[in-house]
Amino acid sequence: MCGKIQDQANATEQDSAAVASEIGGSGTKPNPSSLAPINLDHGDPTAYETYWSKVGERSTITFTGDQSLSYFANAKNLCWFLEPKLEEEIRRLHHVVGNAKVDDHFIIVGNGSSQLIQAALYAVSPSDQPQPTSVVSAAPYYSAYQEVADLLRSGLYKWGGDAYSFNKDEPYIEMVTSPNNPCGMTREPVVNRPQGKIIHDLAYYWPHYTPITSQVDYDIMLFTVSKCTGHAGSRIGWALVRDKDVARKMVDLMVISTIGVSKESQLRAAKILGVISDSCLLDKSPGLENFFEYAQHLMAARWEKLREIAKVNELFSLTEYPSEYCLFTKEFTEARPAFAWMSCKSDMEDLEKILRGHKILARGGKRFGSDPKYVRISMLSRDQEFNLFLERLSSIHGITSGN
């Protein structure tokens, strides 16, 4: 059983989502105190608020009552609800960063990457199979994949678990998240069989999280404004899709489920992406700080502080990342992921429960198909919350085996 830890007896078994409402789930900025739990279970990217506050009017967009009444944004486009300005800024940003090839891909906009995952699964699932196609991902995998795959109890696909354990001679779909959520490591497909379809989830393949080591060119690539810019509330994601029939099926699912995507959200996202691209180009950004440099420095500082605590405390272990050459920054650097994948060196069973006893809410390893000795901790909270997290983590002592 878990070792004894001070205050552990006061730990609750409430679901972290329920607790979130007590500490800022309403959308208001929380005021962390010594009494309130810190919710680092979710990857809510509020860390970038300071940058966007400084940007000010450059990122502002207004609408009048007579704008954007139609369902259609561009009736000639395969994705007819995709705003032309958003498509333009998506292509521009990928060219500026150099992280993905876009010229021979269709762009499909979705209500966040969550809807695009569902649409991609629908689009690549064989329709002539007697049983639902297995959806697999290498553990530790993103915890939502199982929920998305099984939510509708579809006759087309179902969750198949850890890709390392998949040994069936039949069609399958493999979700490849790179950099991986939760561990931050670069990933490649695991199963590698002719019957398979691969969906690459690249939500974190941006310079502030990982070195850009190549301009990737896959059949289906998923991105999201949420983790790129921090604007999770706008619910905008996009897919780069090479095959026209797959792209059309993805559009079909979104038309049936939501009849497209909010134009207001799309145009706001276009404005934000445009600001980021401008910030990377010296001739277009007088007085505008490079967003990726700002975010890199922020993430580097947070990881340095967390590693210092882990080094001194010696109770916790963090993933190590190799130094690699980044094509965007033109220098060698290591990954500074959006999540810390942390384990405990002590002989204990449930690190999530241990941290909860110290009012730190994290997502346990079992949710990712891994060991409960691991937790995923968001590195993207506001400064006050992150600093309080470091303070509480530093205070954890006295883990012992037994009892």
Image (cartoon, helix red, strand yellow):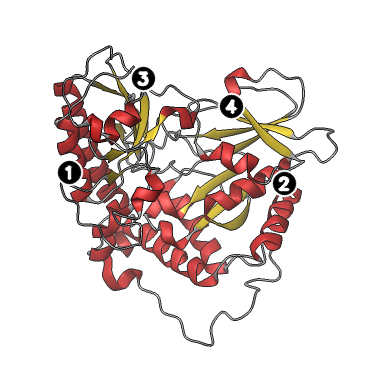
Counting from the top left corner in percent of width and height, residue 91 is at 52, 56
Mark 2 in CB contact with mark 1 (< 8 angstroms):
no
- The mark lying in front, picked from 2 and 1, is 1
Q: Is residue 73 above or below residue 399?
A: below
- Give the residue at mark 2: 123
Determine whether the residue tagged by mark 1 lies in a helix, strand or loop.
helix
- Give the residue at mark 4: 189
- The mark lying in front, picked from 3 and 1, is 3
Q: Residue at x 50, y 26 (%)?
A: 369
Q: Is residue 400 above or below residue 224?
A: above
- Give the residue at mark 1: 387
Q: CA distance from mark 2 to mark 1?
A: 43 Å
Counting from the top left corner in percent of width and height, residue 177 is at 51, 35
Q: CA distance from mark 2 to mark 3?
A: 40 Å
The answer to whether residue 55 is seen in the rendering is yes
The answer to whether residue 78 is seen in the rendering is no
* Mark number, residue 302: none
Depth check, front residue: 248 or 28: 28
Q: Residue at x 26, y 42 (%)?
A: 299
Q: CA distance from mark 4 to mark 2?
A: 19 Å
> Which is more N-terminal, label 2 or label 4?
2
Determine whether the residue tagged by mark 4 lies in a helix, strand or loop.
loop
Residue type beneath disc 4: Pro
> Which is more N-terminal, label 1 or label 2?
2
- Give the residue at mark 3: 349
Residue type beneath disc 3: Glu
> Which is more N-terminal, label 1 or label 3?
3
Counting from the top left corner in percent of width and height, residue 287 is at 22, 64
- The mark lying in front, picked from 4 and 3, is 3
